[in-house]
Image (cartoon, coloured by chain):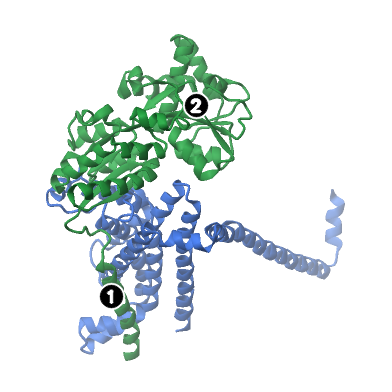
Chain colours: A blue, B green
Amino acid sequence: MTKPLNVEHDSPSIAGHGATKSYAMQESMIVKWSLIAISLVFLALFLILPLVSIFVTALEKGWATYVASITDPDALAAIKLTLTVVLIVVPLNAIFGIVAAWAITKFSFKGKNVLITLIDLPFAVSPVIAGLVFILLFGAQGLFGEWLFQNDIKIVFALPGIVIATMFVTFPFVARELIPLMQMQGITEEEASISLGASGWKTFFLVTLPNIKWGLLYGLILCNARTIGEFGAVSVVSGHIRGMTNTMPLHIEILYNEYQFTAAFAVASLMSILAIITIIIKNFIEWKAKDE
Amino acid sequence: MKRRKKSVLLPGVFTAVLLLAACGDDPLESSEGKAEILNVSYDPTRELYVEFNKAFANHWKEQTGQDVTFQQSHGGSGKQGRAVIDGLEADVVTLALAYDIDEMAHTRQLLNEDWQTEFEHNSSPYTSTMVFLVRKGNPKGIKDWDDLVRDEVSVITPNPKTSGGARWNYLAAWGYADKKFNGDEEQIKSFMKQLFGNVEVLDSGARGSTTTFVEREIGDVLIAWENEAYLSINELGVDEFEIVTPSLSILAEPPVAVVDKVVDKKGTREVAESYLEYLYSDEGQEIAAKNYYRPRNEEILKKYSDQFQSLDLITIEDFGGWQEAQKTHFADGGTFDEIYQ
């Protein structure tokens, strides 16, 4: 037991130093490459393989079946509904996100932290609960149910319900992206603008908006992606009426359950393409933002 | 600065144009001068109603000159019932269990408590039953419920606690054992215990069990709805599976009803009632048979006798109705808890 210890002590200090150094280098190289290999294998197994399999399954029965699945009236209606929801939800979330972020970062007031916490709430709540909340509010047995029924206003199981549930789920994306950015930028530029006589609106459009442009776009893209893909909350409030209240993810689930695997994957491939485009735009924006 | 403004403006205009285009024909807008019927149904009836809706639309047009269009919604029967109670404005409901429609009458008085007397045959224009789906050539030689308790047979059925279909399976097996052992409860329970001891995967729903059996290729026999069994054979492989009809099974009566409160508000009562009535017509019965539901009309049933083998059928009334069966067998501490632990 004592012998090896002695040997170590006896060895020249420089040699010992050199040995540990190259050993450490060696180790870091091994660690580096094995980490890269692990992440590559992981990515291939859990991301690329499934993604490829979506397209393979979608095109399994040929191009004609693929086109037929996507141009089926119910599929088209689902695509259209999803895009309609995007066109309503994303602009509204842009406005609310900017307003909330503005209020939080440019003014000081009591209860600010409460507001920040509230904005984060949708991240913490399960989408299913988010959907059920709106059933409880606007469902026939809900708080406003009887009144809505009497006045023939449909909220849940129709477009408004889908929009509201999606808004709830996607609300934090824009605000969360803008708050740290605007906090970092502070209010000096706005103060300067206003002290030079610019109106509030002018200050916003000429000073604030250009400053937060990239952050805003980034938030909108995330919001957009989630809006297209949202399943849980929408599933609860949709009513699953074919050709009317089925969004793309719901349509995919139904096709799958009806043994129409090829059609299900055809629509899924369409969603994947949208996702890939989103990622490309996101990277482009990050790159542009870095550039400025 | 000016340049930047432009770059913000352009996508804005683009978005506005798209928005307008999307609003042009809102998918949720109803057209006028036409009757629109929303049929809220359960999972496996989609093909049936796609075909039937077309037939009825033609019939209605001939009779009255009015155009009628249909919307369909499908999902688990209990979930669909819940959605109607929560405000999904179904003109008619065509569900798997009377229990789900009873709930609509109890909680929101959407229809009368005696809705089931509204149409013939307990308001069930077609029926189904539980049969066995086995692998091609029936390698384990499965003929009847007896074969399901053999040691080397692996059975697939969903969990009766969570699945409506599974409760029918359970009661059908119970009914068979009841007949075999002349109502000796000890022997029935030990039969059921053996049967569920052979269950390899207990999925939470009927579709899940089908996937387990068909896609994952687990098990020797799947206990399934007759119409589902035919559907999976046709959709997934004529050469891979066979249907075995046991000597005794249970009669499932999927009921239909007009939702009074909705049709009175929308003014669609007449067309909704005729729609369900038409399910009993020769054409309606024929379409049901083609989609593997047993028609009520004896002659049409005979015509499809290759497809629907005759067997002894017990009914839910033999168990004292659903409320009673639920309490005895599937509630906590019921017979299912006793035999499956």
Task: Answer yes or no: is residue B128 visible.
Answer: no
Q: Amino acid at mark 1?
A: Ala
Q: Quadrant of residue B291?
A: top left
Query: Looking at the picture, does residue B305 appear above or below residue B27?
Result: above
Q: Residue at x 35, y 50 (%)?
A: A235
Q: Is residue B105 left or right of residue B248?
A: left
Residue pointed to by mark 2: B245
Pointer 1 chain? B
Label 1 sits on a secondary structure element that is helix
* Residue at (50% x, 42% y) in the render: B234
Q: Position of residue A61 (x, y in %)?
A: 54, 57
Towards the viewer: A138 or A6: A138
**Please, is residue B149 above or below residue A89 in the view?**
above
Contact between marks 1 and 2 (CB within 8 A): the answer is no
C-alpha span from label 1 to label 2: 60 Å
Q: Which label belongs to residue A190?
A: none
Q: Position of residue B124 (x, y in %)?
A: 30, 31
Q: Which amino acid is tagged 2? A: Thr
Give the number of the mark in front: 1 or 2: 2
Nearest to the observer: residue A32 or residue B7? B7
Identify the residue position indicated by label 1 in the image. Answer: B16
Which x, y percent locates residue B261? 16, 41
Tell me where residue A127 appears, x and y as whole percent.
36, 52
Task: From this view, report whether residue B184 is shown above or below residue A263.
Answer: above
